[in-house]
Image (spheres, rainbow, N blue to C red):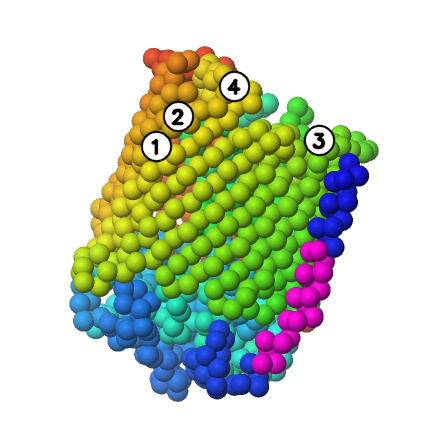
């Protein structure tokens, strides 16, 4: 223990010294930039920054998508869009013009998106926050503090949907944020047009009377797989690389303190819910409120919080030793989620081993909902520092979880050149049992060097009265990224008693500490002489992990090539050599098969493909053949998506695995069917059906939504879940709990009111 404390103190001192050095040296690049304005060529150099002027008007235009108000002609045109794909640096292939106005209440953005083949414009799905990469689209990025780290994103497609999100850390996008704004589109024989109105009350910004904002604009032309930006971005980065954004000059937004109130009414019928046999008819009332403390700091309140309109989780196939991760879907927790997000970075991977705060731990326990009584969240910017404080209070649920209070505190300071330093604190505190608590203390640091290098450090420690062992976390990541190469490496140390009960740790089992090392290199290759081939991305990686005694848990050598075609199709063949070390027998979920302790290794070939996802009908599949623990695995999955204009979308996905082991053989199949019909961008019906024979769970979901603003409106939702008996699959456990299905039918209405006038 003394040795561990000494190591922890040394690491803390090193991190503290690095933080102080970064803070002290941070102003130097700014001084150099100011001194060489118009001369430099580095990141953020004034010589390369694109700029444009916003125009103040007395009365803004009517937002109808037609762009025929004479006031638009008073604004300066934004032109000169440059391709990001397929030919980086080339002029956009279709004429594009944008104008920006503002009045005392809102900023207005108009886009003339002309097209020589208007009949080939891809409308896209009429669903809020639909994937804009699968259609024609227009996007706006507003860096309202011009800190080159944080921004708001607003976008749409020819169907007139609302697409919005928040950018944090110069690249991470949270599209689950729902702002209050409006958009309209129209289309004629010359192209399509966009008209946006974004109230200043939706944004957060500084207090200066005259302001410059960071700005970038993007147009996607779906049939050509073309992306073009107003302010060019190197092709190894995306639109949200804010250090490459241009400048919107001439803004003078009003000082504001926004207050909104969103009550809801809910009536429901519930049958056979866990712990509640029979039928119940609950009626509930609750509310959310947002109070602007300053123009850049807001307090959110929630009472009797309800998430009845939220979609059900996608079921997952569980064949590995690692615990499953389910993403957050509840609106209250999704807003400003990136402010509270502190996790170990994984360049090139969708897996996150550690999240110091994972909001699904609040109000959900082992898949069962725990009622939330009330909560509050303070978030925003104070003196150039981002701050967040969250407190939630949950009821007790007999046999599931005691009443608890949940606290999260976060402070982060953005520094020049994509750098930042921050701290986080989380706590679960029982409201009934003294001494029943869990706490986490953490610190994170990111340092950007030049345009290509990024280094991350993450340190943490948990404290629980029942745990007395190695409770620390250390994670270090380095990444180099240029136009043609991406190289990254990381090291993790997760103590056996590191247990953030308000977070998530991807590990083989509770109480197992481990260290992990990883190295990855990728090459981006363009082949201009081959017209049908857009890009090759061959890459290789090596990963190894050991428990804290030195026993090798996993090892992997990965060889992979990403092949992208001009048509939008992809193919990704790969060859892996993998080792799995079992320090104790492992029982595969949903079966009676137990694999003995030992070390198993072998080769696996897999390949995944998909056709152009913007096409009316697209297909995808994945095939995997090779070793699996002590035996073999053959996995096949496939999907088909159908789109009819912007109104009807649907899809079916099937995932099938055949596992052969000396201890037994079994199959698993997971099927998912989705269907959605949009009457208008704000009025839609959607449904999904899922079935997994590994768990024996069948779920059905149907929702009718008539959206108003910021995620409010009328919702009618039906959910059904039933545990089915599975037969004819060798090794599958008999099902317990078979019986009447769980059903809920909910009608919920929520409305947002602007109460700012009462607090002025």
> Marks 1 and 3: CB-CB under 8 Å?
no
The residue under label 4 is 597
Q: Which of marks 3 and 4 is nearer the N terminus?
A: 3
Q: Which of marks 2 and 4 is nearer the N terminus?
A: 4
Q: Which residue is drawn at 48% across and 86% down?
A: 38
Q: Nearer the viewer, mark 3 or mark 2?
A: 2
> Marks 2 and 4: CB-CB under 8 Å?
no
The residue under label 2 is 628
Label the magenta part by its dominant secondary structure.
Answer: helix
Q: Residues within 10 Å of mark 2 (few under 14, many from 20)?
A: many
Q: Residue at x 59, y 59 (%)?
A: 446
Q: Relative to 452, is 350 above or below?
A: above
Residue 10: give its label.
none
Q: In this view, does 120 lie to the left or right of 146?
A: left
> Marks 1 and 4: CB-CB under 8 Å?
no
Cα gap from disc 2 to disc 4, whole angstroms: 14 Å
The residue under label 1 is 604
Kindly indicate the quadrant of the structure image that contains residue 434: top right
Q: Residue at x 54, y 36 (%)?
A: 545
Cα gap from disc 2 to disc 1, whole angstroms: 8 Å
Cα gap from disc 3 to disc 2, whole angstroms: 40 Å
Q: Which of 202 and 139 is in front in this view?
A: 139
Q: Earlier in the sequence, mark 3 or mark 2?
A: 3
The residue under label 3 is 402
> Marks 3 and 4: CB-CB under 8 Å?
no
């Amino acid at each position: 223990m003394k040795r561990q404390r000494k190591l922890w103190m040394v690491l803390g001192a090193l991190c503290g010294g690095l933080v102080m050095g970064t803070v002290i040296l941070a102003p130097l690049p700014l001084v150099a930039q100011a001194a060489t304005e118009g001369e430099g060529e580095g990141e953020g150099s004034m010589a390369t920054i694109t700029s444009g002027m916003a125009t103040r008007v007395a009365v803004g235009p009517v937002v109808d998508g037609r762009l025929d108000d004479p006031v638009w002609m008073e604004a300066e045109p934004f032109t000169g869009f440059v391709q990001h794909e397929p030919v980086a640096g080339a002029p956009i292939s279709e004429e594009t013009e944008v104008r920006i106005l503002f009045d005392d209440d809102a900023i207005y953005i108009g886009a003339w998106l002309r097209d020589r083949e208007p009949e080939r414009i891809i409308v896209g799905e009429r669903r809020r926050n639909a994937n804009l990469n699968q259609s024609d689209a227009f996007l706006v990025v507003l860096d309202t503090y011009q800190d080159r780290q944080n921004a708001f994103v607003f976008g749409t497609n020819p169907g007139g949907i609302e697409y919005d999100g928040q950018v944090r850390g110069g690249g991470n996008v949270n599209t689950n944020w729902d702002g209050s704004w409006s958009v309209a589109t129209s289309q004629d024989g010359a192209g399509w047009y966009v008209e946006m109105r974004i109230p200043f009350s939706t944004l957060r910004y500084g207090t200066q009377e005259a302001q410059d904002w960071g700005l970038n604009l993007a147009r996607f032309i779906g049939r050509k797989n073309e992306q073009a930006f107003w302010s060019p971005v190197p092709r190894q980065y995306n639109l949200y690389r804010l250090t490459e954004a241009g400048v919107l000059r001439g803004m003078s937004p009003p000082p504001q303190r926004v207050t909104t109130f969103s009550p809801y009414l809910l009536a429901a019928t519930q049958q056979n819910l866990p712990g509640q046999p029979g039928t119940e008819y609950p009626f509930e009332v609750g509310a959310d409120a947002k109070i602007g403390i300053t123009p850049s700091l807001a307090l959110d309140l929630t009472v009797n919080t309800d998430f009845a309109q939220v979609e059900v989780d996608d079921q997952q196939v569980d064949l590995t030793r690692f615990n499953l991760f389910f993403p957050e879907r509840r609106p209250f927790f999704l807003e400003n989620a990136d402010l509270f997000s502190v996790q170990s970075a994984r360049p090139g991977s969708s897996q996150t081993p550690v999240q110091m705060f994972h909001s699904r731990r609040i109000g959900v326990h082992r898949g069962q909902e725990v009622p939330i009584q009330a909560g509050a969240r303070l978030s925003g910017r104070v003196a150039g520092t981002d701050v967040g404080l969250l407190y939630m209070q949950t009821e007790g649920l007999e046999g599931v979880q005691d009443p608890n209070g949940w606290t999260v505190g976060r402070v982060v300071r953005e520094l020049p050149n994509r750098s930042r330093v921050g701290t986080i604190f989380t706590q679960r505190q029982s409201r009934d049992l003294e001494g029943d608590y869990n706490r986490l203390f953490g610190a994170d640091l990111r340092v950007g060097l030049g345009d290509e290098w990024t280094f991350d450090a993450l340190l943490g420690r948990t404290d629980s009265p029942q745990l007395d062992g190695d409770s620390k976390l250390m994670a270090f990541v380095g990444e180099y990224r240029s136009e043609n190469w991406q190289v990254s490496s990381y090291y993790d140390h997760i103590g056996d008693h590191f247990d953030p009960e308000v977070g998530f740790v991807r590990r083989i089992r509770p109480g197992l500490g481990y260290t992990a090392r990883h190295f990855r290199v990728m090459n981006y290759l363009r082949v201009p002489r081959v017209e049908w081939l857009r890009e090759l991305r061959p890459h290789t990686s090596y990963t190894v992990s050991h428990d804290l005694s030195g026993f090798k848990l996993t090892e992997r050598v990965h060889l992979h090539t990403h092949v992208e075609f001009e048509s939008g199709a992809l193919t990704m063949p790969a060859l892996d050599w993998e080792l799995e070390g079992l320090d104790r027998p492992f029982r595969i979920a949903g079966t009676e098969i137990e694999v003995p302790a030992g070390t198993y290794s072998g080769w696996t070939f897999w390949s995944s493909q998909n056709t152009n996802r913007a096409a009316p009908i697209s297909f995808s599949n994945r095939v995997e053949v090779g070793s699996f623990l002590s035996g073999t695995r053959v996995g096949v999955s496939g999907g088909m998506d159908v789109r009819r204009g912007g109104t009807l979308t649907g899809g079916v996905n099937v995932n099938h695995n055949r596992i052969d082991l000396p201890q037994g053989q079994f199959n698993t199949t997971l099927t998912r069917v989705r269907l959605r019909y949009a009457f208008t961008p704000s009025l839609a019906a959607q449904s999904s059906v899922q079935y997994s024979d590994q768990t024996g769970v069948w779920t059905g979901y149907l929702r009718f939504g008539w959206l108003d603003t910021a995620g409010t409106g009328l919702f009618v939702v039906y959910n059904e879940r039933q545990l089915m008996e599975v037969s004819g699959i060798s090794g599958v456990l008999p099902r317990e709990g078979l019986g009447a299905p769980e059903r809920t039918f909910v009608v919920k209405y929520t409305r947002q009111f602007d109460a700012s006038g009462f607090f002025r």
